[in-house]
Amino acid sequence: QVQLQESGPGLVKPSESLSLTCTVSSGSIGIYYWNWVRQSPGKGLEWIGYIYHTGSTNYNPSLKSRVSISIDASKNQFSLKLTSVTAADAAMYYCVRGYGYSPHPFGYWGQGTLVTVSS
Amino acid sequence: QSALTQPASVSGSPGQSITISCAGTSSDVGRYNYVSWYQQHPGTAPKLMIYDVSARPSGVSDRFSGSKSGNTASLTISGLQAEDEADYYCNSYAGSNTFYVFGTGTKVTVL
């Protein structure tokens, strides 16, 4: 059973960049799609984007200008960077593997990491 | 792209059946058979319950079933149990510009 674990700073200052890493264990990062999904406190879910093991990416149009996802297969990790954060970016961030060999549905979730945006 | 519309809350007694709706448009739910449903208990990550409108991942109870009619998808929980009390979210593929849209979420209460 694949396991995913998010890591990164829990506190980010407004206008700075948010950087998170997801470490994949119990399985190779190869041949799968890897997503980031976030959930604002008390609110719903929002898909951020995905990366394929080849490095190909697609992003939510509403975040596209500020987001990038990268992959390091040698470390079995993929990462999220979100620039120019505001209070609206405060959320629980989840890394998620697609179910089967596609980015969707969102089959395997990490436990999530909470990011606060505050000076 | 707006979120898919779900009722804020649905409730039922143990043993009953309930249905949660997920209203989209002809650009998402109505166009693609890529609707999925997720269950989320407080403080935990969402769990995939239904995908491709009506398919169940291995390990998910057959009390959960999905369907779609036009621009609206539905999740039915039969034989409602206390452990089914959770938040439920739908999701749909919405094409190569928007990609994936979630529903607004529904809180299920077992009376």
Image (tube, coloured by chain):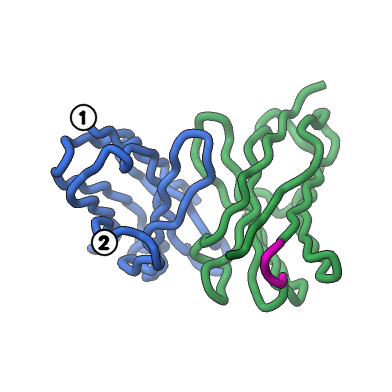
Chain colours: A green, B blue
Check the image and report above or below for B77 versus B54. above
Check the image and report above or below for B105 versus B100. above
Residue at disc 2, secondary structure: loop
Mark 2 highlights which residue?
A: B62
Nearest to N terminus: mark 1 or mark 2: 2
The quadrant the C terminus of chain B occupies is top left
| Magenta: main secondary structure | loop
Residue shown at 32% from the left, 41% from the top: B83
Residue farthest top in this picture? A119
Q: Give the magenta-colored segment's residue range.
A: A25-29
**Chain letter of the residue beneath label 1 in the structure image:** B
Residue shown at 77% from the left, 72% from the top: A55
Q: Is residue A36 left or right of residue B73?
A: right
Q: Amino acid at mark 2?
A: Asp
Residue shown at 16% from the left, 35% from the top: B13
Judge whether residue A27 is colored magenta.
yes
A51 or A95, nearer to the observer? A95
**Distance of label 1 from label 2 (alpha carbons):** 21 Å
- The count of marks equals 2
Q: Is residue B62 left or right of residue A93?
A: left
Q: Amino acid at mark 1?
A: Leu
Q: Is residue B66 left or right of residue A39?
A: left
Mark 1 highlights which residue?
A: B111
Residue at disc 1, secondary structure: loop
The answer to whether dots 1 and 2 both sit on one chain is yes
Q: Position of residue B66 (x, y in %)?
A: 28, 61
